[in-house]
């Protein structure tokens, strides 16, 4: 059973601690091996007619080789070619004719990254563009809300608003936290029983995930932190998580994982604090009928 964060657990937060207000600087202006738009604006506009030629008349995307044409010379992309039988313009049977001339023209072009509107300033030789776009740091992030397979994508400010408005996720200020997870019937551990809390510190946002699942037959609880941003920025930070009671304590120290890595990928690589259920119940005290875990932690910025 998938449950929205918080419905299965009573999360009692006692966050405190300082946000040291270290803002990310010159974030969007890292050196790039590629030429920048400003120096190329003229080339681009003079290429507009060619760019229009390269737009598939069916899906309106830029066509990449192999580019196809009908016997009358109407072009379309290979994806659309595989879906239609006759030419969408003249209705002639399509056959399997390549348009090598247009492919050659295409290969000589330079195009801006498709995430230009999101801030990417890079220009690419035609054939390098797709590869760049798969790794462009401006490409949208997937919503980090786990378990719901939420299809929403966007940049970090957009996702933050989405998490709070649509998923009703709690956000806390500060880099230290003290979170209590309470569950009255811990013996019916289901996969994907989980909770998400967001921490805002150092000018970035961090996702604290807590969930119950089974490793093989063994029911466990796991807590880990993901970073709302790219991996290179995530690696500037470290965090600890601690859980314990009755004189025992477990500590995990880790590096937040970028939300580019899916929640499941991080979970399945066990990159976090893992507490076996027996131990979790021991930490909970009482008669082992109720889960009452206190997870405390801290996020800090490593010296550069
Ligand atoms: Zn197409
Ligand atoms: Zn045609
Ligand atoms: Zn880009
Ligand atoms: Zn979402």
Image (spheres, helix red, strand yellow):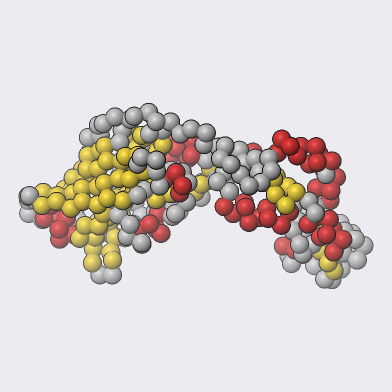
In this rendering, would 183 be left or right of 4? left
In this rendering, would 190 be left or right of 248? right
**Residue ID at (72%, 52%):** 125
Percent x, y of residue 263:
40, 54
Q: Nearer the viewer, residue 212 or 115?
A: 115
* Quadrant of the rendered image containing residue 216: bottom left
In this rendering, would 178 be left or right of 133? left
* Quadrant of the rendered image containing residue 140: top right
Residue lying farthest front? 304
Say whether residue 161 is visible. Answer: no
**Residue ID at (55%, 46%):** 137
Q: Nearer the viewer, residue 129 or 265?
A: 129
Percent x, y of residue 144:
43, 47
**Residue ID at (43%, 31%):** 23
Percent x, y of residue 283:
12, 52
**Residue ID at (46%, 34%):** 24
Percent x, y of residue 246:
7, 50
Residue lying farthest right? 72
In this rendering, would 36 be left or right of 155? right
Q: Nearer the viewer, residue 249 or 167?
A: 249
| Quarter of the figure with the N terminus | bottom left
Say whether residue 20 is visible. Answer: yes
Q: How many marks?
A: 0
| Quarter of the figure with the C terminus | top left
């Amino acid at each position: 059973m998938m449950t929205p964060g918080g419905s299965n657990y009573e999360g009692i937060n006692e966050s405190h601690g300082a946000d040291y207000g270290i803002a990310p600087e010159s974030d969007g202006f890292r050196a790039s091996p590629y030429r920048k738009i400003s120096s190329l604006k003229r080339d681009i506009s003079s290429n507009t007619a060619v760019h229009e030629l390269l737009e598939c008349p069916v899906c309106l995307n830029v066509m990449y080789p192999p580019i196809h044409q009908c016997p009358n010379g109407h072009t379309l992309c290979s994806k659309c070619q595989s879906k239609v039988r006759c030419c969408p313009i003249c209705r002639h049977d399509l056959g399997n004719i390549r348009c090598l001339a247009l492919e050659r023209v295409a290969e000589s072009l330079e195009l801006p990254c498709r995430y230009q509107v999101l801030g990417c300033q890079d220009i690419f030789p035609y054939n390098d563009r797709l590869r760049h776009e798969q790794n462009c740091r401006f490409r949208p992030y997937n919503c980090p809300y786990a378990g719901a397979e939420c299809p929403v994508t966007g940049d970090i400010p957009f996702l933050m608003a989405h998490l709070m408005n649509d998923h009703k996720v709690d956000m806390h200020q500060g880099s230290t936290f003290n979170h209590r997870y309470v569950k009255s019937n811990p013996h019916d551990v289901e996969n994907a029983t989980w909770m998400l809390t967001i921490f805002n510190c150092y000018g970035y946002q961090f996702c604290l995930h807590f969930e119950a699942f089974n490793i093989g037959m063994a029911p466990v609880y796991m807590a880990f932190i993901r970073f709302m941003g790219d991996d290179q920025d995530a690696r500037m930070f470290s965090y600890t998580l601690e859980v314990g009671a009755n004189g025992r304590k477990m500590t995990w120290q880790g590096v937040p994982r970028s939300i580019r890595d899916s929640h499941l990928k991080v979970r399945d690589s066990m990159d976090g604090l893992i507490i076996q259920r027996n131990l979790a119940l021991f930490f909970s005290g009482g008669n082992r009928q109720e889960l009452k875990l206190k997870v405390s932690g801290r996020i800090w910025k490593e010296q550069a």
